[in-house]
Each structure stands twice: as C-alpha cells, then as structure tokens.
Image: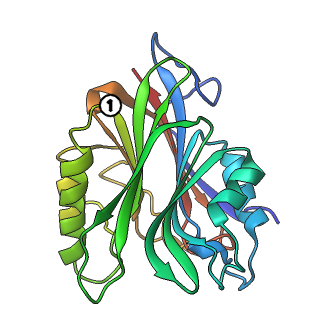
C-alpha cells in the first residue's frame, strides 16, 4: 500500500543520504527518525510489522528512536518487535523495558546502522497511577571516528504536565551535559512552547520551525506537533532538512525524519 501523503519541509539541500560528507568541510550527515509504532498494530486493526518496516526503510535513517514497543507481549503475538524490525531493516536493534505488560514487556527501542559502544536504560519519574517511562541511550562511533550519544524516549501522555516536567528535568540532568555530542528523539507528548519543551530547550537545540511547527499527530489528520528530534551542543549540529511522513495506516503518529549535519 502506498503512503497516502507526505508533508515535507526542506531547510537545506543535501546531495546524498547516510553517513556521508556534507555540504561544507567536516560536516557529516546523519538521518534521524523518530516513530511511535503503536505496539505494532496498524490503524486498520491488524498487525503488520512489514508495513511498519517499509515506512522506516523508505526514510533510510541511520538512527531510529521507536516508542510504544512491545517485547513478547500477547497483543504483539509474542514478537520481539525491536529485533523483528532490526532483522527486516538490517539494523542493530536494542529494546529498553519501561514496564511489564500483557505477558511480556513494553518500552522504547533504538535501531542503528552502526553497532553500539555502550547502552543504558534510565528510568524516568512517574506518578503512582501513571505508566512508567524511560529513556534509552546508545553511544555509537561514526565512520568519521566521532563518538555521539543517541537517546530515545516517550514522555507521559496524560492531560497535565506534572510528570512530563519531572521527566524532562531528569533528561537534562542525565544527558544534557554528557561527554559526547548527543541527539534526543521521541514522542514527547508536549507541544512547542509548553513548559516541558521549554525546559528541554535550555539544554537542547530544536530541529523544528518554532513559528510554524509541522504537526505530527494524529496521522489521519495531523494537527499538533508532539514528536521531536533535538540535539546538543547546538553549535556542533546543523539542521539540513526535516520531513513529517504521514501514513494513516502504519500508526496513529506520523514518523518524523530529520537530516542533521554534524561538525
């Protein structure tokens, strides 16, 4: 099935994708995707890992942050979704548990074209009556010899900002002053200009147009931006282009692709 619509915001033009040399000396190009995959179920009510994999494959990312990822749950037919997607895409997968669920586990995952130096799963604060949340970090080495961190996360989805504010403060404390230049990606469940996003932007550069942010949710008719790619330190990164990949079947979220240049 073809994608129903693509919304593209091009900021700059690059000549080739992947871990390549950029448009100026010492600028390496990274394609970063964040995608909430709705535990592998599609909006048609079926379960189709191949369909989700095709969305990711067509974006040709180097690094992928996945949210709402099931590991051996009954609703996901006992699949390890991160490994299944990694196998289909020929990417290195890693899953991070946020909580036990439905006979298995539920949390975050990362896919990468490069192997990992280190990984860690950092639990985030949450209220007693809400879902546990976590941030998954991998440290990887680029072909250029540069080491970077990549963090995927999924913040609280409820109506008030209480937990999200606590969660972004921990993200800034743990990852905001890290040893390596880093990228933060995920479903943050907060719109631009909100308190949680404002707190993150104290430590992280933004890849979106603050005046006219392209919406990423819901996939059937996007009206608000809640999916993000951010980076630090701001001076080491350049936003080359961004793309909201809208498909009304794969998930209730649009995938969000950002092409970054790294100095």
Q: Quadrant of residue 177?
A: top left
Residue 119 vertical position relative to residue 189 in the rendered view, above or below: above
Residue 206 showing in the rendered view? yes
Q: Quadrant of residue 84?
A: bottom right
Which residue corresponds to the image point at 31% horizontal and 66% vertical from the top-left? Answer: 191
* Color encoding of the figure: rainbow
Q: In the rendered image, which quarter contains the C terminus?
A: top left
Coordinates of residue 125 in the picture (x, y in percent): 24, 70
Residue 198 showing in the rendered view? no
Which residue corresponds to the image point at 27% horizontal and 32% vertical from the top-left? Answer: 179
Coordinates of residue 256 in the picture (x, y in percent): 52, 54
Q: As drawn, is 182 to the left or to the right of 36? A: left
The residue that disc 1 covers is: 180
- Nearest the camera: 183 or 193? 183
- Nearest the camera: 15 or 33? 33
- Nearest the camera: 120 or 243? 120
Which residue corresponds to the image point at 65% horizontal and 73% vertical from the top-left? Answer: 40
Residue 156 vertical position relative to residue 5 in the rendered view, above or below: below
């Amino acid at each position: 099935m073809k994608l129903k619509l693509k919304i593209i915001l091009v900021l700059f033009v690059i000549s080739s994708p992947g871990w390549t040399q950029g448009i100026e000396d010492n600028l390496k190009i990274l394609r970063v995707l964040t995608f909430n995959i709705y535990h592998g179920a599609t909006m048609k009510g079926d379960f189709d890992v191949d369909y989700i994999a095709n969305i990711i494959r067509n974006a040709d990312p180097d690094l992928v942050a996945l949210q709402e990822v099931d590991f051996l749950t009954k609703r996901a037919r006992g699949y390890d979704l991160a490994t299944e997607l990694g196998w289909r895409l020929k990417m290195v997968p890693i899953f991070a548990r946020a909580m036990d669920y439905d006979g298995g586990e539920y949390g975050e995952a990362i896919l990468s074209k490069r192997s990992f130096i280190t990984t860690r799963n950092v639990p985030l604060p949450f209220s007693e009556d809400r879902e546990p949340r976590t941030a998954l970090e991998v440290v990887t080495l680029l072909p250029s010899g540069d080491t970077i961190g990549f963090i995927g996360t999924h913040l609280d989805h409820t109506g008030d900002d209480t937990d999200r504010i606590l969660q972004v403060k921990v993200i800034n404390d743990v990852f905001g002053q890290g040893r390596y230049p880093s990228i933060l990606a995920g479903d943050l469940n907060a719109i631009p200009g909100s308190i949680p996003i404002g707190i993150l932007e104290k430590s992280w550069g933004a890849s979106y147009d603050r005046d006219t942010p392209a919406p990423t949710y819901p996939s059937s008719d996007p009206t608000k931006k809640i999916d993000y790619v951010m980076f630090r330190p701001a001076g080491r990164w350049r936003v080359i282009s961004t793309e909201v990949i809208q498909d009304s079947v794969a998930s209730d979220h649009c995938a969000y692709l950002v092409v970054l240049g790294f100095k």
